[in-house]
Amino acid sequence: MKLGIIADTHGYLPPAVFKIFANVDCILHAGDIGSNDIVDELEILAPVYAIYGNIDTWPIVSRFSQTLVTDFEDLVFYLIHHIISEKFVRYELFRKKLKPDVIVYGHTHNPDVSTHNDILFINPGSTSKPKKNEKGSVIVLDLKIRPLKPQLIYLP
């Protein structure tokens, strides 16, 4: 199974995303969607699991939740838009009695892939408003390849 991971679209979906996500089985959107149209367009490619972010308003906040826990193959994924700190995440996970394998987040507009306490943290960056004058980015994650190796892809 291949996942397309995206965040911080802010109402704009660059055309290159359609080519990059053409062969994914599912898409995870980590918030700051900006418009219901974004999810509708992504759903043409594959089923979308999304959460809302801090810029999202009605009707997005009525369609999605603030966090999401879902399983793909034998892995538990936790989607959250904004990670305040690792301490906060540990508290939230403890409170919810969760032990995810992967945490997908956004908000910073900076792509990041790192591991902390045996949890893979993935931030795909932003497709529409990247930081530091970089290009927009997304991540493709093939769950058949172990250990997991998220592929960061910069948009043209």
Image (cartoon, rainbow, N blue to C red):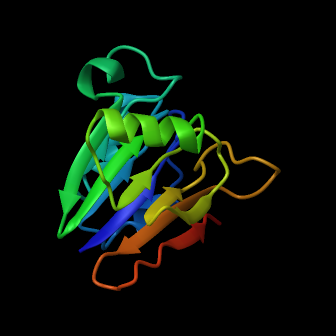
Eyeballing the image, is 106 above or below 148? Answer: above
Q: Kindly tell me whether residue 47 is visible in this rendering.
A: no
Q: Residue furthest top?
A: 58
Eyeballing the image, is 38 above or below 115? Answer: above
Eyeballing the image, is 37 above or below 29? Answer: above
Residue 50, by quadrant, is: top left
Classify the position of the N terminus by image quarter.
bottom left
Q: How many marks?
A: 0
Residue located 49% across and 65% down the image: 139
For this view, does 26 lie left or right of residue 38?
left
Classify the position of the C terminus by image quarter.
bottom right
Residue 74 at x, y percent in the picture:
18, 69
Residue 126 at x, y percent in the picture:
60, 48
Residue located 43% across and 69% down the image: 140
Eyeballing the image, is 1 above or below 64? Answer: below
Residue located 28% across and 46% down the image: 98
Residue located 42% across and 58% down the image: 5
For this view, does 133 lie left or right of residue 149?
right
Q: Kindly tell me whether residue 35 is visible in this rendering.
A: yes
Residue 97 at x, y percent in the picture:
26, 41
Residue 26 at x, y percent in the picture:
26, 60
In this view, the residue in front, 145 or 3, is 145
Q: Residue furthest right?
A: 132
